[in-house]
Image (cartoon, rainbow, N blue to C red):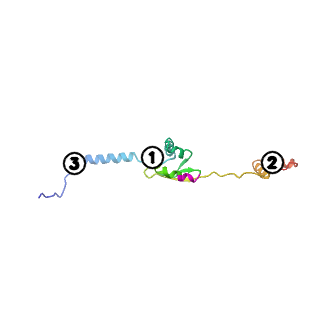
Amino acid sequence: MPRLMDSVSVNPVISQNVASRVNAMAQQQSATAVQPLSQERLDKYWDKLLENELYAPLLRDKKVEVTSDTTFDIIANNSYFETELKEYKMPILEQLRTWTGIRDLFCSVSVRTEAHEEKIYRPTDKFNAMAEENPAIHELRKLLTEIDY
């Protein structure tokens, strides 16, 4: 039965080739380091997503906002959008991860509704609203006493 050797000899030329390949791969990886997510990059890729017929109707009027190096918010004007997005969220994220090179990219939905102004119904309310914008109306009211608001 042959005896196993206790030590292994490595050819120095092969060792140098392996070391140079490892160094080259390390340099290539550091040169192609993933850039953190920026608003410009996200906007660029978001516009690219909107070119897709599948996603465009869902995402067309939505804005995006970077919240950190690896996360962003999709700004919606109602909470129903979140349920609409569920079906498409993973494919959208996968596509954005591919384009950005950020494997741990995540998104969340932020619902922002516009504040509604109070409607003015009574003449007194209308007068007070106009007086806030132009205080000289009070002087005019004093001069024209026969006009009731």
Question: What's the residue type where badge 3 is placed?
Answer: Pro
Q: Is residue 82 magenta?
A: yes
| Outermost residue toward the top in this view | 51
Q: Which residue is mark 2?
A: 137
Q: Which residue is mark 1?
A: 95
Magenta part of the protein: which range?
Answer: 78-83
For the residues bearing labels 2 and 1, Cβ distance under 8 angstroms: no
For the residues bearing labels 2 and 3, Cβ distance under 8 angstroms: no
Q: Secondary structure at mark 2?
A: helix
Local crowd at mark 3 within 10 Å, few (<14), some, or many (≥20)?
Answer: few
Q: Residue at point 21% right, 51% down?
A: 10
N-term-proximal mark, 2 vs 3: 3
Question: What's the residue type where badge 2 is placed?
Answer: Ile
Q: Which residue is mark 3?
A: 12
Q: What secondary structure characterizes most of the magenta part?
A: helix
In this rendering, which labeled residue sits more in front, label 2 or label 1?
1
Q: Secondary structure at mark 3?
A: helix
Q: Is residue 78 left or right of residue 24?
A: right
